[in-house]
Image (cartoon, rainbow, N blue to C red):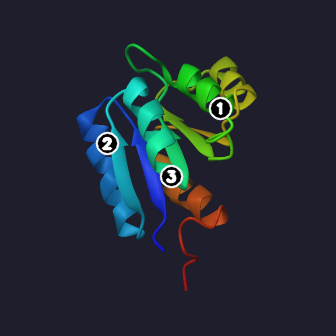
């Protein structure tokens, strides 16, 4: 059975990029363009993992993470914060709200994300 990643990202360019690299690893990708949609889709789809941007309009990624972790039916879904915001207090806050990892979008972000997913068993190990 294919693993499913819910990507919650307000940048269409970034969402398309993430979809491409995740699908290359055999992961089915569903995209939500804002936090409200991400919350709704998480409850409907129960994905294998949620990859969540922080800086989004309306409901930001911290709020989404906090709400998901407070909801029994989706609290166990692992959340990876994947964002341009790399301040140490943001990392600490994201982890306090229940994210399992915080990956700043930099030159190594894609490789770090795929390796994190590999260690979680969502991406198959390389042969």
In this view, the mark in front (1 or 3): 1
Residue 28 location, quadrant? bottom left
In three-dimensional space, the C-alpha distance between marks 3 and 2, rounded to whole angstroms, equals 16 Å
- Which residue is drawn at the image coordinates 50% and 52% (left, top)? 47
Q: Which of 40 and 90 is in front in this view?
A: 40
Q: Which mark is residue 43?
A: none
Disc 2 target residue: 15
- Which residue is drawn at the image coordinates 50% and 40% (left, top)? 43
Mark 3 or mark 2: whose residue is earlier in sequence: 2
Disc 3 target residue: 47
Which element carries disc 3, helix, strand or loop?
loop
Asked if 58 appears above or below 15 in the picture, the reply is above
Is mark 1 in CB contact (under 8 Å) with mark 2? Answer: no
Among all residues in the image, which is located at the extreme bottom?
127
From the viewer's perspective, tell me whether residue 79 is left or right of residue 7.
right
Residue 113 appears in the picture as rendered = yes
Q: How crowded is mark 3: few (under 14 residues within 10 Å), some or many (20 or more)?
A: many
Q: Residues within 10 Å of mark 1 (few under 14, many from 20)?
A: few
Residue 55 image offset from top left, x and y in percent: 44, 21
Asked if 16 appears above or below 91 in the picture, the reply is below
Which element carries disc 1, helix, strand or loop?
loop
Residue 22 image offset from top left, x and y in percent: 40, 59
In three-dimensional space, the C-alpha distance between marks 1 and 3, rounded to whole angstroms, equals 15 Å
Q: Which mark is residue 71?
A: 1
Residue 72 location, quadrant? top right
In this view, the mark in front (1 or 2): 1
- Which residue is drawn at the image coordinates 24% and 36% (left, top)? 12
Mark 1 or mark 2: whose residue is earlier in sequence: 2
Residue 107 image offset from top left, x and y in percent: 44, 45
Residue 96 image offset from top left, x and y in percent: 75, 26
From the viewer's perspective, tell me whether residue 62 is left or right of residue 99.
left
Mark 1 or mark 3: whose residue is earlier in sequence: 3
């Amino acid at each position: 059975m294919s693993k499913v990643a819910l990507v919650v990202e307000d940048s269409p360019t970034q969402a398309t990029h993430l979809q491409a690299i995740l699908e290359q690893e055999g992961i089915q990708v569903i995209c939500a363009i804002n936090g409200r949609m991400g919350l709704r889709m998480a409850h409907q789809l129960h994905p294998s993992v949620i990859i969540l941007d922080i800086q989004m309009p309306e409901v930001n990624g911290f709020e989404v993470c906090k709400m998901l972790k407070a909801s029994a039916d989706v609290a166990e879904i692992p959340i990876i914060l994947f964002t341009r915001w790399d301040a140490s207090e943001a990392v600490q806050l994201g982890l306090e709200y229940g994210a399992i990892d915080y990956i700043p979008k930099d030159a190594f972000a894609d490789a770090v994300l795929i390796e994190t997913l590999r260690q979680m068993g969502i991406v198959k190990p390389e042969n």
